[in-house]
Image (cartoon, rainbow, N blue to C red):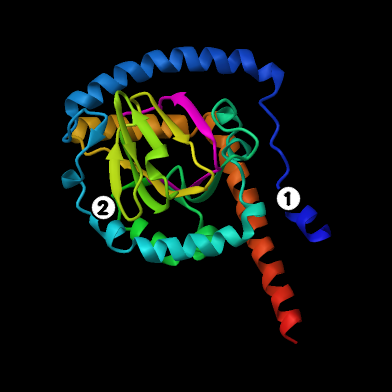
Amino acid sequence: MAAAEEIEPRPSAKPATLNRPIRKFVKKRGKRLMRWVAQFQAKDGLVPDTPFIDNAHFPFLREFEEKWEAMREEVQEILKHREAIPGFEQVSPDQHRIAKAQQWKTFILYGFGDRLEKNCRQAPVTAEMLSRVPNVQTAWFSILAPGYHIPAHTGVTKGIVRAHVGLIIPKEREKCRIRVAEEVRAWKEGEAFAFDDTFEHEVWNDTDEERVILLFDFDRPMRWRGRLLNKLMLNLMKLTAFYQEPKKNLADFEARFEAATRRADANLEKLSD
């Protein structure tokens, strides 16, 4: 029990009360600005402005479908240390409305364009493929508990496209699904799809099994003006607490997971002596 207590992630505190009025102001003004930016990016985009976007626009997704079993093997090893994998709300306290009680765990490989080297060493095949994705922004193994529902929400920028790759999917897969705008899809092992997360979306896992996918975001193909504006907006977002808090938490949890695997390896060595 002692070892488990050492690696149990400490719950991240919600944003301080004094910060809330400022956050509300930033969110209100930011949403208006992002609506204008989204309209511009949609017009300047080189892919359709639709909830789901055909895989033909993203040829690199084929490799993820071809090597999905290798990725599944990697995540199965990672799940052996699930107590050291944080809930999404622990990494990013601003997500506490949609992620609760560590029911949606995230093993993050890329955060805000930065590669998490320690975590990537735990999944070398996956990390290698992600390195070939044009301008990958975020990437993580998304682990959804049985019976959990992620409420309807929207992403912050149309400047990125989100991809999902099914790795461990419940047998009753039709009960494990995502809605984007008015369209609903169930995940399938080895299948990838792309969508625009600025459309309202929500997720259900109405089964008694865990669901695991690879989730990653990459820059939306756009003309030069759209690319320039997207780069500017992403750099501005990195100056805010919405970026700074998760960035610090990512480093902490990455170190904790590495420590957990080292302890497990040391215990195995002792047992084999």
The residue segment tinted magenta is 137-158
* Direction front: furthest residue: 172
Query: Residue visible at 16% across and 35% down?
Result: 46
> Residue 48: x and y, percent?
17, 31
Percent coordinates x, y for residue 23 in the rendering: 57, 18
Quarter occupied by residue 259: bottom right
Query: Residue at coordinates 57% horizontally, 33% vertically from top-left?
Result: 99
CA neighbours of label 2 inside 10 A, class few (<14), some (14 to 19), many (20+): many
Residue topped by disc 2: 61
N-term-proximal mark, 2 vs 1: 1
Task: Classify mark 2: helix, strand or loop.
Answer: helix
Query: Taking 3 as reference, is 241 left or right?
Result: left
Residue 195 visible: yes
For label 1, the residue is 8
Q: Residue furthest right?
A: 2
Q: Quadrant of the C terminus?
A: bottom right
Distance CA(mark 2)–CA(mark 1): 35 Å
Q: Which mark is residue 202?
A: none
Q: Is residue 141 visible?
A: no
Q: Is residue 222 left or right of residue 162?
A: left
Type of amino acid at the residue the image marks with label 2: Leu
